[in-house]
Image: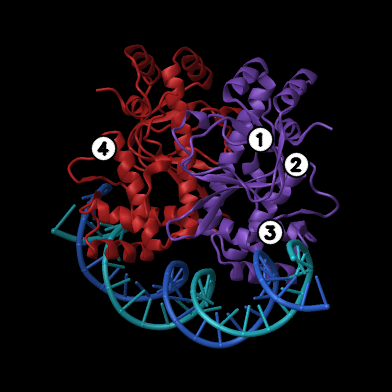
Chain colours: A red, B purple, C cyan, D blue
DNA sequence: AACAATCGTTATCATTTATCAATGTGCTAC
DNA sequence: GTAGCACATTGATAAATGATAACGATTGTT
């Protein structure tokens, strides 16, 4: 089976045999990284682009007062920005959430491959625009959604993203996030996350049990969240 | 004087005469757009990239319950994403805040110019990464900063961005945002924005008077905000 | 098996922010 | 000049969320 990076790009547009083998080559150097280790830290000078092939990672920032804000989750197949290399330093850190498998790709190499593989190029562009859309969706959530809507919305997002890369089995998928991590992602306190999760459990919308999210009632959850999957850009552009 | 788009790109890396005239050509078709008119709406199919040469615009989203969340401000020189054209539809709307001057650039044309002008290409990449950094900074603000810190932080951001393109005169700059708009950007209610602005005025940090922001005490304001300008990527990357 | 560490759960109380309501102020159209 | 409108301001009250603390459950380590 193709790795998660390939699967993700495929979900953004079809790839041919030739594209796939190029991507295989790019990710051949994958290495294992233990849980909770920083891949790169705020202030570091960015190096090559890296790609999460397995496991989860998170972008985050620690504030002067010691609090943490998680700014994005990287699921298998997700990559950090193509052009970070042009920046003097990182404005945030990236850390594995659980043990992960990570490949690194020199940005010059990636660019050359994209030049020769328009399918890959298009898929990468879409992936990047989707990442930006996700950032905007988080802003919308934090600004204008209630805490229960916010939690439900994040769960819908993660569910869809997980399903896209084949990580959903039955009605659930593995969610390696503690309530503390959820709180830091959603701008809430851990206790309040706990309350909200209890509410969602009580209304039979969803449930987290031993690290797996079970969405008993996807429709109800999406309704609570006011979830509109448009920003994940699953629809393909039609030819003119 | 070169237009705001050129000035902005220059602030991200030096351009030569040749680059500048290319950019002049790209933006020659600018047109005037009245205040509060949508340049593109959620659900629309994206067309060419556009660039704000003068005036302000905002990205925003209206939620099912009628509330609005502003997700970004576009100042003179700012452009919408280079590759939006590859998406099936917009996931948010963009609207002028005040009367603006807007140029449109076909994405194919822009790509060709970038291919022949590496300086422009590098500046565009940095601009885009800065936009993403700004999105992340907004998430951090909404998640982990108090309302007064949040307001102060946005003001610091806008001040720096305005100063970058030469819009700061003396100790202030034009801020064409109502308290309602600020509330919709900051995830607060207008009344609360008003109270916070009063606090900031009382502590002599800053003041908004008839559409101009006056930062009496920039140091105090940045301190309140916990502002770290790193994410705006003003530092240039040094050669190896 | 014993222990420590982390995480989840619940209750209570404090704080922040939203909501509602009323009034003021400056601007535009007629 | 005045009516109408959008926006700013302020106060009173309610609702949502945070802070703290205590305890139980789970997991990993020795």
Can you identify the residue that label 3 sits on?
B223
The residues tagged by marks 3 and 1 sit, at their Cα atoms, a distance apart of 33 Å
* Residue B100 spot, x, y in % from top left: 71, 43
Between label 3 and label 4, give the one nearer the viewer.
Answer: 4
Q: For the N terminus of chain A, give its image quadrant.
A: top left
Would you call the spot at circle 4 few (<14 residues within 10 Å), some (14-19), or many (20 or more)? Answer: some
Mark 1 burial class by Cα count in 10 Å: few <14, some 14-19, many 20+: many
Mark-to-mark CA distance, 3 and 2: 20 Å
Indicate which disc, 2 or 1, sits on the residue closer to the N terminus: 1
Crowding at mark 2 (Cα within 10 Å: few <14, some 14-19, many 20+): some
Q: Mark 4 touching mark 1, by CB under 8 A?
A: no
Q: Residue C2 sits in which quadrant?
A: bottom left
| Mark 4 element type | loop
Q: Return the disc, 3 or 1, that comes first in the chain's sequence.
A: 1
Number of numbered discs visible in the structure rendering: 4
Q: Circle 4 sits on which residue?
A: A167
Question: In the image, residue A66 lies at what x, y percent?
Answer: 52, 57
Q: Is D30 placed left or right of A145 in the picture?
A: left
Going 73% across and 50% down the picture, which residue do you hit? Answer: B159
Picture residue at 22% right of the left edge, 54% below the top: A217
Q: Nearer the viewer, mark 2 or mark 1?
A: 1
Q: In this figure, which residue is indicated by the disc labeled 2?
A: B164
Taking A28 as reference, is A205 left or right?
left
Cα–Cα gap, marks 2 and 1 = 16 Å
Q: Sequence order check: which comes first, mark 3 or mark 2?
A: 2
């Amino acid at each position: 089976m193709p790795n998660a990076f390939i699967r993700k790009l495929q979900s953004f547009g079809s790839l041919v045999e030739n594209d796939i083998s190029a991507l295989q080559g790019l990710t051949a150097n994958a290495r294992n990284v233990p849980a909770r280790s920083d891949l790169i830290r705020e202030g570091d000078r960015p190096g090559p682009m890296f790609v999460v092939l397995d496991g989860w990672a998170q972008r985050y920032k620690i504030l002067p007062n010691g609090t943490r804000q998680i700014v994005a989750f990287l699921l298998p197949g997700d990559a950090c920005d193509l052009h970070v290399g042009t920046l003097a330093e990182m404005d945030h850190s990236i850390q594995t959430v659980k043990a992960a498998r990570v490949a690194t790709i020199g940005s010059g190499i990636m660019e050359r491959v994209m030049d020769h593989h328009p399918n890959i190029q298009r898929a990468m562009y879409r992936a990047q625009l989707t990442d930006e859309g996700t950032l905007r969706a988080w802003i919308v959530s934090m600004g204008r959604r209630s805490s229960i809507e916010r939690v439900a919305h994040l769960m819908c997002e993660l569910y869809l993203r997980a399903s896209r890369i084949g990580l959903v089995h039955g009605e659930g998928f593995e969610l390696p996030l503690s309530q503390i991590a959820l709180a830091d992602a959603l701008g809430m306190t851990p206790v309040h996350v706990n309350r909200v999760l209890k509410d969602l459990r009580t209304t039979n919308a969803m449930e987290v049990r031993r690290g797996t999210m079970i969405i008993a009632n996807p429709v109800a959850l999406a309704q609570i969240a006011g979830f509109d999957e448009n920003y994940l850009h699953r629809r393909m552009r039609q030819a003119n």
